Image (cartoon, grey):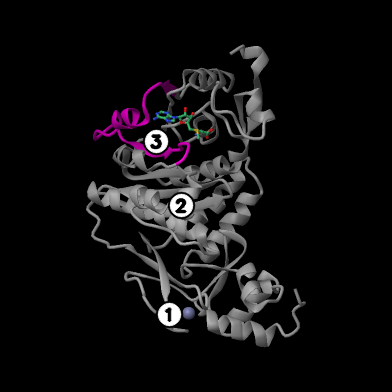
Amino acid sequence: MQLDQDITTITEGKTKILVPKAAIESKVPPMDVAFFNPRAKLSRDFSIIAYSAFIKKFHGPKTFLDSMSGVGARGLRVANEIKEIEHVYVNDLNPTALELGKKSAEINNLQNYTASEEETCRFLSSFSRKGMRAAIVDIDPFGSPTRHLDCGIRATVHGGILSVTATDLQVLHGLFNDACRKKYYGTPIKTHYADEIAIRLILGCIHLIAARLDVEATPVFVENNMHYYRVYVRILNKSDTRDMMGFISHCRSCGNREIGKERKELCDICSGTMIAAGPLWIGSLFEKEFLKDMLEDIPNHTVDKKCAKTIQRCILESEMPGCYYTLDELAEMRKKSPASLEKSITILQKNGYASSPTSFNPTGFRTDCKINKILELFSSQIPYPRQM
Ligand SMILES: C[S@@+](CC[C@H](N)C(=O)[O-])C[C@H]1O[C@@H](n2cnc3c(N)ncnc32)[C@H](O)[C@@H]1O
Ligand SMILES: [Zn+2]
């Protein structure tokens, strides 16, 4: 690669990053020279906020392992933008990507940035001894992260954070159920809330692997967009006595859904046959205090305005039931165009139900109201919706 001709410098957050020009100019970032995806900026913005909020309250080695770093975008930003971080170790199999990262570290005057060229699990294993484990560990592969989870969990210190990206959307969306069962130990179903099912499958897999290693893994924050799912789990080195695996049962006839330990065969509302997703994680997706720390920390960073809005939604939904509804889904059922999200939530709340928006979908809401009652309330209280 001719560095001067093919490489350009961008600024993301407060950090200068050398990236292949092709990664900026082409629609799909090329994987061959050195990988950088400009569209993943928002995910890296969330990382900066989450890691920063976490590390401020963490007592222990303030180290970050970027186990699949590409050109080092996340690791460079963590080293440069989170002042509490003591050292960042980046790793990738691609030497060109690592070279670019090292040059970027020089441009940003970073003394706390070390690069290595190892297979991810070998890299993570070198940190899995007591005294070597890191406060924050990131796994950001092309596709599924599952083959790296054992090593990631073992490299994270007691009380630390493991963050994991998954981009094998077709597997998590039910196109290849055998592959999903093999990789994530559960299967999805196609629903309007498929994104929540995908996140719960990833969390279920992490929970099972962690439990096998005598480790407890608990989600503190999750986020997704069209191209990826990302989860942040807190790792505690103690036996997991909780049983947080279960199923989402869904009735295709009436839209009723239930999340619980057992899968349900028949729908309580219409007696229709239910289909099930799982086994998957049925516990909370967010830790409210962690989210509040994230929100409070935002002004310290240069991040997209969308971050605050998303985290506010996460706070509102953090203690709400699983399996959100979308306005599109309700419009399909009612054969009428939907009322606004705000109005829909207000109707539910005024009738004594808990309801909130969800960070998973701009037109999604959570509620403890069942589908038959939701439809009844919306029909009586949104009397003149426009005909579709
Ligand atoms: C999605 S990219 C990482 C992007 C990066 N974290 C960022 O935020 O820009 C995945 C990276 O993992 C590297 N990779 C894939 N398999 C690997 C393995 N088994 N060991 C080490 N690196 C690997 C690839 O070279 C690629 O740079
Ligand atoms: Zn039903």
Residue at the disc numbered 1? 267
Mark 1 touching mark 3, by CB under 8 A? no
- Residue 120, image x and y in percent? 37, 30
Q: Is mark 1 within 8 Å of ligand 2?
A: yes
Mark 1 or mark 2: whose residue is earlier in sequence: 2
Given the image, on which type of amino acid does mark 1 rest?
A: Cys
- Residue 295, image x and y in percent? 56, 53
User: Distance from label 1 to label 2 (Cα)?
Assistant: 25 Å
Q: Please tell me which residue is depicted at 54% across the width and 83% down the height of the picture.
A: 372
Mark 1 touching mark 2, by CB under 8 A? no
Question: Who is closer to the viewer here, 56 or 353?
Answer: 353
Q: Is residue 377 left or right of residue 50?
A: right
User: Distance from label 1 to label 3 (Cα)?
Assistant: 50 Å
The dot on residue 62 is: 3
Mark 3 or mark 2: whose residue is earlier in sequence: 3
Given the image, on which type of amino acid does mark 3 rest?
A: Lys
Using a 10 Å C-alpha cutoff, classify the residue at mark 3 as few (fewer than 14 neighbours), some (14 to 19) or many (20 or more): some
Whether 136 is among the magenta residues is yes
Nearer the camera: disc 3 or disc 2: 2
The stretch of residues the image draws in magenta is: 114-143
Question: Who is closer to the viewer here, 373 or 293?
Answer: 373
Tell me which corner region of the image, top left, top right, bottom left or bottom right, holds residue 309: bottom right
Position of the C terminus, as image quadrant, is bottom right
- Residue 119, image x and y in percent? 36, 27
Nearer the camera: disc 1 or disc 3: 1
Q: Please tell me which residue is depicted at 30% across the width and 31% down the height of the picture.
A: 127
The dot on residue 172 is: 2
